[in-house]
Amino acid sequence: MTLTVLMNAGPWLSVPPPGYGGIENVVATLVPELRRLGVRVVLASVESSTLPVDEKIAVFPDGQFSALQRPYNQVCGVSQAHLAGVVRALHRRDDIDLVHDHVEAVGLATMAAMGPDAPPALHTLHWDLAKHPELYGTLDGGDRVRVNGVSASQLARAPRALREHSVGHVHLSTPLAVDADRRPTTPKGDHLVILGRINPGKGQDLGARLAHEVGFPLVLAGPVGPYHRPEDLAAAGDEARQNPDVRFFHEHVAPFVDGDRVRWVGTVAGRERDDLVASARASLFPLRWEEPGGTAVVESLSLGTPVVATARGCLPELIEHGRTGLLTADEQELGDLVLAAGLLEPDECRREAATRFTPARMAERYVELYDRVRHGATVPLQPV
Ligand code: UDP
């Protein structure tokens, strides 16, 4: 019998997303693989989504992301309206075997509130679980609503009520991992790269300081708040500093950005991003937060670039110290590890990615989870 899943991607961005869009990218990567495995997918998204699916449900014509700039009391209706559309559809039809929900907070709360006649639901936790303590600390989804994380370390930090609903974790994947071990190798340059939003948790200030102290070229790629290009940030007035990431960049990162030893190139995409990472000696993740999933980590491995990082969050699950990267609990040691990173084997990284981080592997794990959720399993999936 065909399994029909309502995949709730939310109202914020179309799927696949036009630019940055972590959750929408995961959905865009997962759905084709699920369909290859014979799952029927009904996508709850916005009308402009172009991802091929069996059916689409939408309340809004386009992604509502820009509304998030407005105050809470003017935007909270957006996700509620989307969820109301999903609930109406679930009441109207009887072909949905399971809801796979990705909508932060309100998706989980709505699924839990729907009552025993609703289909079972799996809610994927894509973010830092220190958020929403009120919701996560009091969650009661009965046997019908389950959650999964994107790493074991993320779930281990979750409030107890949330953990009691967990069926385990599924690591993130990337299309770059497909046949990563068969692609021609990219010649390595001398630079290191930090790919990610410029943000205190991602630690670009620490990486930039080390670049000067240890003496290695460093490229910082990623947006500063809403600014994707250095010229856009330069043109923004002083009020841009109200954004905490803009303030962090100006106060703690920019003093090290000299255009030579340390460069900030803004957001890179597509081929440019892949070449930048593939040609780097290593990717640096000088993390100061518990990275929940680490897409950029599995992308780096797929591109044959070892990872040098503080051993926080999911990093020890994704990286094998001494084989696919170098990890340390002590951020002062990162400089020594950068120097040693050239000894690691790019092919090892690519093999690891091709085995562990492909979209097909991720989809197989989700199909196992769907089965567990539908049959009320309480034992989490074996960790990998
Ligand atoms: N990214 C990108 N260009 C950039 C910086 C980041 O395409 O200049 C992408 C990166 O390749 C990854 C995503 O943004 O796919 C960041 O995801 P990750 O899970 O690493 O971090 P998050 O921002 O979700 O905490």
Image (cartoon, rainbow, N blue to C red):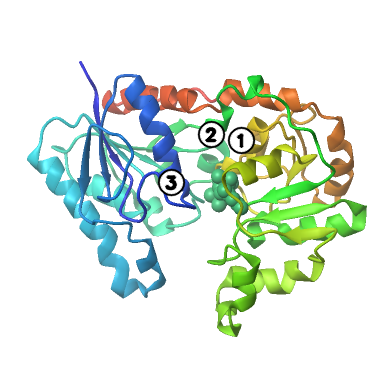
Q: Is residue 30 above or below residue 328?
A: above
Quarter in which the C terminus is drawn: top right
Q: Give the tally of numbered discs.
A: 3
Viewer-proximal residue among 191 and 187: 187
Please provide percent x and percent y for residue 103. 35, 50
- Disc 1: residue Cβ within 8 A of ligand 1's nearest atom: no
Q: What is the secondary structure assignment of the residue under circle 1?
A: helix
Q: Is mark 2 within 8 Å of ligand 1?
A: yes
Amino acid at circle 3: Ile
Q: Which of pointers 2 and 3 indicates the residue nearer the eye?
A: 2
Q: Is residue 193 above or below residue 239?
A: above
Residue indicated by mark 2: 174
Residue 161 lies, with reference to residue 143, above or below; the image says below
Give residue 362's position: percent from left, percent from top: 47, 27
Front-lying residue, 43 or 124: 43
Image spot of residue 331 (x, y percent):
80, 51
- Image quadrant in which you'd find residue 378: top left
Q: Which of marks 1 and 2 is nearer the N terminus?
A: 2
Residue identifier under label 3: 23
Say the numbered circle drawn on residue 377: none
Sequence-wise, which precedes: disc 2 or disc 3? 3
